[in-house]
Amino acid sequence: MPYKSGQRIGVLGGTFDPPHIGHLIVADQVLHALDLDRVLLVPANRPWQKVGRRNITAADKRLAMTRAAVGQAEGLEVSDIEIELGGPSYTTVTLDALSRQFPQAEWLIIVGADAAVSLDTWHNTEKLRRQATIVVVNRPGADFHPPTGWQWELVEIPAVGISGTGLRRRVAMGHSINFLTPAAVIEHIKRWNLYRVDA
């Protein structure tokens, strides 16, 4: 989509290891609920809050899977900005770099309700408060505690009990992940023999 000055752009960051339909539902629901111009899915280069806790698939493979997942979905795009930046991935640094690509854009950072309660543990939160509005996605009827001290929006989404952890576990156990993630992602997982205990 061509860039026009003053666009409202959502940013959905994550490890995307692997990307799945839950990610796509969140991105699409926020895109339409808030009438955004686009939503960028941004795979982390090195997710600093997860390093050391588990093995993380190489960034180039996660980027390829995310691009495969998004395909030609209208309004959704994949950005490799954090991988190009290298090193640990910090949202404030990412927004600085994205702002050079999209001058005068309004930024909205998309997080789950569980992540919203830990925003104050993120890197350089004082700067992040000035840079972006937080979009909290939550299941209808679920408890919600608005992040204090932040500009925020709430978007309710259908409950989808899918996680990257669950998909990795299913692959490791030899179970099907058909329809839990796009077929193009499954093709990459099989080609690279990802998440198998015997890999």
Image: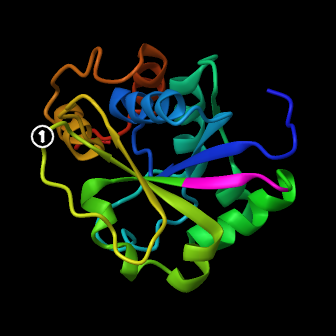
Q: Nearer the viewer, residue 58 or 106?
A: 106
Left or right: residue 79 compared with residue 153:
right
How packed mark 1 is, by other alpha carbons closer than 10 Å (few <14, some 14-19, many 20 or more), is: few
Residue 53 seen: yes
The residue under label 1 is 141
Residue in view at x 33 percent, y 64 percent: 116
Give the percent coordinates (x, y) of residue 162. 23, 34
**Quarter of the figure with the C terminus:** top left
Mark 1 secondary-structure assignment: loop
The answer to which image quadrant residue 99 occupies is: bottom right
Give the percent coordinates (x, y) of residue 117. 27, 69
Instruction: Give the tally of numbered discs.
Output: 1
Give the percent coordinates (x, y) of residue 69. 50, 25
Q: Nearer the viewer, residue 181 or 147?
A: 147
Residue in view at x 81 percent, y 46 percent: 6
Q: Which residues are magenta?
A: 104-108
Q: Nearer the viewer, residue 51 or 8?
A: 8
Q: How is the image coloured?
A: rainbow
Left or right: residue 87 compared with residue 171:
right
The answer to which image quadrant residue 181 occupies is: top left
In terms of secondary structure, what is the magenta stretch mainly?
Answer: strand
Q: Three-letter amino acid code at disc 1?
A: Gly
**Quarter of the figure with the N terminus:** top right
Q: Nearer the viewer, residue 91 or 141?
A: 141
Judge whether 145 appears above or below 140 on screen.
Answer: below
Residue in view at x 57 percent, y 67 percent: 91
Residue in view at x 17 percent, y 33 percent: 170
Left or right: residue 137 compared with residue 69:
left
Asked if the magenta segment contains residue 12, the reply would be no
Residue 86 seen: no
Left or right: residue 39 compared with residue 120:
right
